[in-house]
Amino acid sequence: MMRHLVCVDAKTGKSVWQKELKPTKSEDSYSGMGVPEHGYATSTPATDGKAIYVFLAKSGMAAFDLKGKILWQTSVGSSSSRKRWGSSSSPIIHGDLVFINALQEGHKIFALNKTDGKIAWQWGPDAYSSYQDAYGTPSLVKAKDKTELVLAVPGEIWSFDTKKGDIVWYTYTNVGAGRGNVSPSAITGGDALYVFGGRPGSGVAIKLGGKGEVKESSQLWTSRNSPYVASPVYHEGHLYWMDRSGYAVCLNAKTGKETYRERLQSSGRTPQFYASPVVVDGKIISVSRNAGAFVLEAKPKFKQLAQNTFASDRSVFNASPAVSNNRLFLRSDTHLYCVAGE
């Protein structure tokens, strides 16, 4: 199973270079409800403008220069989770370190030095059987005078010191508790952290700046509303997402109460969502797997503005859109698109 790192000219769409990435370990099989749902190329590369960092699951983390030359490759484990759903986490960068959630492969969270790929710190629980069902990308959270690394796992949330890897705070939650899986990443808004996930879904809000164990009594609110895979987006005091049943959902971020839940107007199939929504110019753009992109007003009153599709394309869109220089980049399992205004 060969992966490819591809560099495309953002203005023209022409390929600049392509790097073939041969696996060093065999991945989980392409069968069942796992890997076929999202593929082997779920992880999104990260860059600091000097190098490109990619997560290759059982083949480890790797770094390339901007011309596609490999700089280093580091193993972060080659195990499988009990569900064998494959990997989905993406690397993130802060300072001189690149972080990856490899709870499935190595039963740990890793911080690697950007320059040589050596492990700066690693942390893993003693009992990892349920924690390996944490599929989300860790989040960087600014709390007071420092930046923390936050990851939600079934039944818990962990926040780490980015430099040392020590746990700054943790809390127990109902999100994904009891053999559930947690796919959304933690997000922030104002002075709070929001975590969703599990099946059946649930959500929790926690005030930033805690230390040690944050008791349940200190949680701001809990909710039975939750996306399954996509991470919500925070905008002007509200949380927005599209759920698996084709509904648009908005919560008041201060209270956790539902502001609206409205069925999306869709021509054709009921939309399903893995990609996370983005807010652009006062509008929410959410790309469905099977029914195009939905555009809503980013306001706590439901108003759908559009459903846009590529008429001849029947491929599956799982990737969250990227926005740069007034262009929207969309990736399916077969195509890359750039959409721009006139």
Image (cartoon, rainbow, N blue to C red):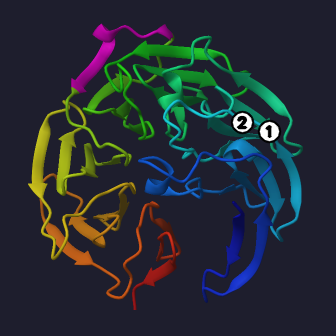
The magenta span reads 212-222
Left or right, residue 207 beside residue 9? left
Residue drawn where x is 70% and y is 53% of the image: 54
Residue drawn where x is 79% and y is 50% of the image: 62
**Residue 265 against residue 336 in the figure, above or below:** above
Write down the quadrant of residue 237 in the picture: top left
- Residue picked out by circle 2: 78
Alpha-carbon span between mark 2 and mark 1? 8 Å
In the picture, the quarter occupied by the N terminus is bottom right
Left or right, residue 272 beside residue 21? left
Residue drawn where x is 39% and y is 82% of the image: 313
Dot 2 and dot 1 residues touching (CB under 8 Å): yes
Residue 48 point in image, percent of width and height? 72, 55
In the picture, the quarter occupied by the C terminus is bottom left
Residue 267 point in image, percent of width and height? 15, 76
Asked whether 91 or 279 is in front, the reply is 91
- Residue picked out by circle 1: 75
Type of amino acid at the residue the image marks with label 2: Ser
Asked whether 113 or 86 is in front, the reply is 86
Residue 91 point in image, percent of width and height? 64, 46
Give the crowd class for mark 1: few <14, some 14-19, many >=20 residues within 10 Å.
Answer: some
Q: How many marks?
A: 2
